[in-house]
Image (cartoon, coloured by chain):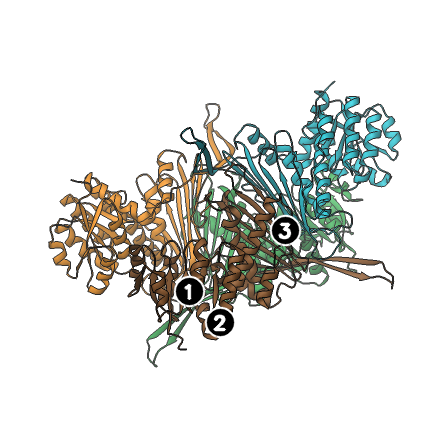
Chain colours: A green, B orange, C cyan, D brown
């Protein structure tokens, strides 16, 4: 397959579709073939600014075309499953705006369908393609942080109190998709406890905390908040060797890697059962790696092209989207149960991944 | 009673006792009469730098003296109850280093004893006497923040992994005592859920989160961490009118009051059951009040003097210490139960306060 | 004149012209009538995205048209004078990208021509129309800062070492135009001393300092630097009542107004010649006013419309551009003279303003 | 000479003397033998807290003693010369609080006297012994920054408007002594231009700027200000390889080393006289070295001991103090001459150093 011959269609010309269209159009790996929307004018506007691009108002007609390799879905979440299934059945590779579907069960079907047909199913976890998050993943995979001990993620801001989703579903997908991306093996918590507050009486949590213990003994916490007048987007990843802080609102030093921490060792004493522990501290340097200036969405569409041509799963595949959805569903169940820890059902996903 | 005639004795000349001694000695309300420690040399050193002060090595002898109005107890927590009870029975007013006792039950006895005898029992919640925390209490009591919607407190740092206490008992007392101080009526959560991580396998939580919903619908969260290479001490208090952030590590702007937030109103529509909601945003100014430079412990000993002479409860009385202890005990119970929400027993405290 | 009937043409479709075109096109005060550039394709691209707009490649033809009220000039600085003079002679109002001309003498001619013809001549000092700078001007004019005591402006960053201009001409126009805008009466220094460094041997100053004493006793300092790996854009304006800091890179608190400072009073003592001084300190609150989100260039084109319809000088008129140019020329002269203070020739400008 | 046998006397028990006394007393290299002050009570208080230390009220008697190796002078600046000369003539090593004297000529005499007698004359430039400044010196001497291109030092704060000194003499000695310490060969500017502002009419500059070009083409700028409500203590040192920023008020990251900058190379083109230039940018990592927690004054007295026992000049010798004084005197001359660049007389100092 010629690397330049891939052709994409964007379905949905609302908020996110134009960004996808622009990045397919400007990529040297893709040709943007069509923009599809029920509203022809809206589709035409997106098509127009991206050069000679077809406008389609019928999904069926779009999927009938032989000259489309991949479909990018940027429609409301409740329609993702139907559109993606149709596209997969039409033999198209698919990338879906997050969340991948409106239920984990729906996502499971999409993952299964893609696998059976040997097609790429990708989730557009855009944040994972930012230079900072890619660097975090690289540092962890190289062992620079050692074993992961804890992850603390804060994403707070004055936010839109939304009619259909609570603060967990609105903001936490960003944190969860990032954690899923940087943890080797993905985010597979042993349980999910969610605590929320709705102090304005809106009927939905506006302040939320997620606690996700991992099998390794590490713990992940996510704090999301729509009512904060200050804006914080920070993820701290504590490791046995080093600790990393990502501060997305500090463009002059987005990543800091601290060679500081606690060393703890248990030592068997005197052949006996008694064990002694030694605690010591590392007080080393701080290091902030340079990051290239690259648009995340450009790297995302390039990864989609690579996954298709190399016939492999993309970095953020359908199962990643499904894992995030599984945690969110467990969070909703925990919230409904007063914060009791809920075990997400990982079996389906594990089975699928087998 | 002459305002200058109060006489104090400090019991315990270890880490905190010298600070108490110095502040009694330099106060214009107090005379430091004696320092008491089993180790006479240690007591003598503390007495020495504070002028002509008696050294006592026998608690009984100290309490027998007629010229002591109040006893300040700065000994290990497990001894607080016995020493305080003896002092109260000897007719002395008492101030106790935090935690007030090693169990809520012990604290209850101390509170009851002091009440029966008409003596002051105070907890040395030092942070509450800093200019910043006093200002927070004042702003809340004046209604400047409106109704409290949420409190998020973060206290993280590279900390000593300690042999006897976990990170909750080491760090959270600061946050809890502050929240108890600034909330009108004190901190009386409906339940306590605690989640902890011990990723180094030390046998004790090194990373912890507390979730405390209040009857008003507000939620309080406390995040404590011994493994963080960065130091954060920040409390955010979201209100219906304004939101306050205390950043203790920013001496140039410790308090910021944001006139920004979300306004949410439910409106009954058309005489029907259906209700509509309006959401709007305030994007007003930020204000950082000037704070005086004052030593917290100096204000604490002055408050003790005022409480004694005015025959009233001090701002941080024994019941405040007991409330903090009740939350910590509930947190330990929740932690042992895998994070299940535990209701602290407020009845005893409420009964006592009646 | 109908407020909606004003018609503008943009001359120059390079870097800045498209921004001007977009703002004229989206303004409810203006119609964008034409874009003029020697390169027809370039002009067509700018015209195209702004709706039905004429393309002109001949300046003479453009100026011959009767349906153009104002011309916005975004061509290289050396061409500003010729184009502006032609436009003024053709009876058009004119706004010129900064610097208004390549010499103060040329600017003087433009100012004189506009005055004689009763036309508006405006300098596009864009920064002056940002919400932050407008607020600074407002606070100063209301007396909130008291008398201005000093202004310290820092604008440093890794910058392009440019072939034709030094760091003063590249960066300081921003600082100087802002200071000119916020100082009542504009920036009229008694002298200009410039110190520069060219440690890389590029032939041009890459690090620079300007010192501008004012008649009032206040002093203005500007620090510009192309070699700094950190980016700072901060202006501190010290006043007798309050001090303001503008930190353009802190979007969460761009303006801070400090009610802190030194009070100094001289008191005649005892009817004698001897004078005593009292020094005291204000340690008051800090206040950060909320700023609206508005695009500066949109406010600039609205101000141009207002100036034309109200037949008054715009906030950043030709004389403001001329004053900035006068300081820059004096700075170059000072630099050539080893940092000796040089008096800018204010007479011409004062005469013009009479 | 036994390393433990050195004995010191502190002359002057006012503001700084107690700090010197405490550090001599707690050093393992020194014994604090005596504290000397005209006010016997004041001397006794300082002696008292430091153990069994003699009190002297007569300088002559002190200098007559055989058991004193070194004298530390912490008296008003105008008395430094007389006391130091007497001490040197009595065969004592001498360390003098900054400024070393009240005139460069007086300092020259002190330097000459010490040299002739083979005694150590040290200036107490305390800041130079902080871990941060020592690390800066080390990094520069190892070539980590490459050639120094510029130094920009800012030290601003609400300060005491003082009766006897202006802001240059009050604050700039810190900056100048640090720059002198970290620059290989010390601070030897080709000229000094000083600009000051006295907008309150106090009779002394309250806002000041120093510009110091070096022979290498590098430039040093110092900004000091008594009227700033914000506190900044920051030195930026731009190098051809890396740039270092010292932010003394950021304890979590005092030093940052940026591997970012501009590369500029001139290339002779085509065997002709014409030269082309290439400009490129390094956008590398940032690194913040860990710094030990050490009290600067403790390291200073240890350095004095080392210099005495090793019979070498201390890191901050009398000539360093004299160089700083020379720049300050030139600054005053420049200020009096309206900012004209003044050449400090380095000849005397160079001759002395020969």
Q: Give me the C-alpha separation between circle 3 and circle 1.
A: 34 Å
Write down the residue under mark 3.
D342
Q: Give me the C-alpha separation between circle 3 and circle 2.
A: 33 Å
**Quadrant (top left, top right, bottom left, bottom right) of the C terminus of chain D:** bottom right
Looking at the image, tell me whether mark 2 or mark 1 is earlier in sequence order: 1
Write down the residue under mark 2.
D118
Write down the residue under mark 1.
D87
Label 1 marks which chain's residue?
A: D
Check if mark 2's residue and mark 1's residue have beta carbons within 8 Å: no
Q: Residue at x 26, y 49 (%)?
A: B26
Looking at the image, tell me whether mark 3 or mark 2 is earlier in sequence order: 2
What secondary structure is marked by label 1? Answer: helix
Q: Position of residue D51 (x, y in %)?
A: 29, 65
Q: Residue at x 64, y 33 (%)?
A: C181
* Residue B214 position by quadrant: top left
Q: Position of residue B173 (x, y in %)?
A: 33, 52
What secondary structure is marked by label 2? Answer: loop
Looking at the image, tell me whether mark 3 or mark 1 is earlier in sequence order: 1
Q: Are marks 3 and 1 on the same chain?
A: yes
């Amino acid at each position: 397959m010629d690397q330049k011959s891939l052709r994409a269609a964007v379905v949905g010309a609302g908020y996110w579709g134009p960004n996808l269209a622009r990045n397919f159009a400007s990529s040297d790996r893709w040709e943007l073939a069509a923009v599809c929307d029920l509203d022809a004018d809206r589709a035409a506007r997106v098509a127009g600014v991206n050069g000679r691009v077809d406008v389609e108002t019928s999904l069926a007609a779009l999927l009938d075309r032989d000259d489309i390799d991949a479909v990018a879905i940027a429609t409301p979440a409740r329609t993702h499953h139907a559109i993606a299934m149709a596209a997969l059945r039409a033999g198209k590779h698919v990338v879906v705006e997050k969340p991948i579907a409106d239920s984990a069960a729906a996502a499971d079907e999409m993952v299964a369908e893609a696998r059976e047909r040997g097609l790429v199913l990708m989730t557009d976890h855009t944040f994972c393609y930012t230079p900072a998050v890619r660097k975090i993943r690289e540092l962890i995979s190289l062992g620079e942080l050692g074993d992961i001990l804890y992850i603390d993620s804060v994403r707070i801001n004055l936010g839109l109190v939304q009619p259909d989703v609570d603060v967990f579903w609105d903001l936490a997908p960003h944190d969860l998709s990032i954690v899923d991306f940087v943890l080797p093996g993905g985010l597979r918590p042993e349980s999910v406890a969610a605590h929320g507050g709705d102090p304005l009486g809106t009927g939905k949590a506006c302040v939320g905390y997620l606690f996700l213990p991992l099998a390794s003994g590490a713990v992940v916490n996510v704090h999301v908040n729509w009512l904060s007048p200050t804006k914080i987007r920070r993820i701290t990843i504590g490791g046995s060797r080093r600790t990393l802080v990502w501060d997305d609102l500090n463009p002059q030093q987005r990543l800091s890697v601290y060679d500081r921490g606690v060393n703890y060792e248990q030592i068997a004493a005197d052949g006996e059962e008694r064990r002694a522990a030694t605690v010591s501290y590392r007080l080393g340097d701080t290091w902030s790696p340079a990051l290239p200036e690259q648009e995340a969405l450009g790297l995302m569409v390039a990864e989609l092209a690579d996954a298709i041509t190399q016939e492999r799963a993309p970095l953020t595949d359908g199962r990643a989207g499904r894992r995030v959805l599984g945690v969110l569903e467990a969070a909703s169940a925990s919230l409904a149960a007063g914060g009791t820890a809920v075990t997400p059902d990982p079996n389906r996903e594990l089975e699928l991944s087998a």
